[in-house]
Amino acid sequence: MCSHESSIQPAQFLLVVGVPVASAFLLLQCLRWHCPRRLLGACWKPDSQEEPVAHPTPLPEDEPSRGCPPATLPEMAAFYQELHTPTQGQTVIRQLMHKLLVFSAREVDHRGGCLMLQDMGISLLIPPGAVAVGRQERVSLILVWHLLDAPSLSRAQGLVSPVVACGPHGASFLKPCTLTFKHCAQEPSHARTYSSNTTLLDAKVWRPLGRPGAHTSRDECRIHLSHFSLYTCVLEAPRGREARKWLQLAVFCSPLAPGQSHLQLRIYFLNNTPCALQWAMANEQPHGGRLRGPCQLFDFTGARGDQCLKLTYISEGWENVDESSCQLVPHLHIWHGKCPFRSFCFRRNAVKALTAQHLPVRSSSPCTPSRMAWRPSTWKSSDSRHQRKNPGRCLPLSLNHPHATGCLQSSLNSCRCCWNQTASQAMTGVGWPPTWGSVA
């Protein structure tokens, strides 16, 4: 009897000790597999195989984080239902599932139809006969303002158009539909369309669609669609050729109220496409920011380094409160179409403000307290479209207007000589003056 009990003891020992140990090991393995790599150190750190992990590079302030919780099935169903619900001809701007989207939807029958995104330069044409007689199809046109949905690009590639989606994904018609959107490549033959045959919520897989220049005209990309998916345009210059695109600089600030002591200017580096400027306007809307003067157009090349934005003049009665009068903008943020911006903050000088109280005040039409310069390789005038080389020279961002006269030395409270009703309405539609005079 005793010998029999002694023969059972090892089996009992395995059941009592081995099962918990194996369960703990499997649990650790599951935690390791399901935890993201950046959290692996907090989930499981084996002493024998631990390797030094480099600290991740922090994202810039204009680049959103990639950490988004996965969508549930009801959330995905509500997402696509809202995108494909007819908008009665209206263009809707809304954030859905962590994505800022601009979209329009409608029902189309055998007579065809057209969808347009207002002020974005994007349209989708469904020709007559594309839908069978007696059927109706819901279609949607979507501008994706989520930067992480754009293609991953090399240093030689530049993003020159928005990311556009046609829905429902995978829909096909009896006749090809035509998608049209703007691009900012200087040489249309260097612009290549890309397509991602995925839904909006899936990970994007971008692939070239035809050869470079196959779908581009001077400033427009036109694609004949056999089915609906996601599309964009990438700048790819041939070997030995320099890639170039048109870049627009836009300046925003909030209206200066009576008694306000601080003012902030924000300068955006945008692709020269309508939807890029509209994105900046939408970004400024919660802060009350308005576009101050016409955008400045520049010839931008992919062979440059980081860009310098520098203050060259501050109006009397104001001072810069930032640590520096010069700010750098990473080259790839501009080249890859990340829409970066930089800001300068100004404060009224107390002594100057006291002397200015006795001057005529026009609180609704102040002058901007500064003038700036940017150091690109080539400057392009937005009026004459004449190019000139300016190596090593900061170029003034002079938001001048044909009806405006220079008034560079006037104080903010007394500046009336550079304002007139014609120029004000032409630039902003409200009683706000042209802000900067021209610089020789």
Image (tube, rainbow, N blue to C red):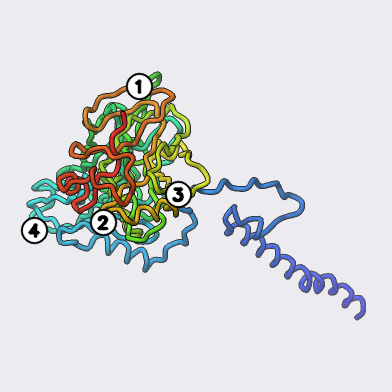
Q: Mark 1 or mark 2, which has the lower sequence index?
A: 2
Q: CA distance from mark 4 to mark 2?
A: 58 Å
Image quarter for residue 26?
A: bottom right
Q: Which residue is mark 4?
A: 134
- Identify the secondary structure beneath mark 4: loop
| Residue for badge 3 | 63
Left or right: where 45 falls relative to 438: right
Which badge, 4 or 3, is on the more N-terminal residue?
3
Mark 1 or mark 4: which comes first in sequence?
A: 4
Which one is closest to the eye, mark 2 or mark 3? 2
Mark 3 vs 1: CB contact within 8 A: no
In front: mark 4 or mark 3? Answer: 3
Percent x, y for residue 30? 62, 61
| Residue drawn at 45 percent across, 32 percent down | 155
Element marked by disc 2: loop
Select label 1 or label 2 by which is in front: 2
392 in relation to 114, above or below: above
Whether residue 46 sits left or right of residue 60 in the image: it is: right
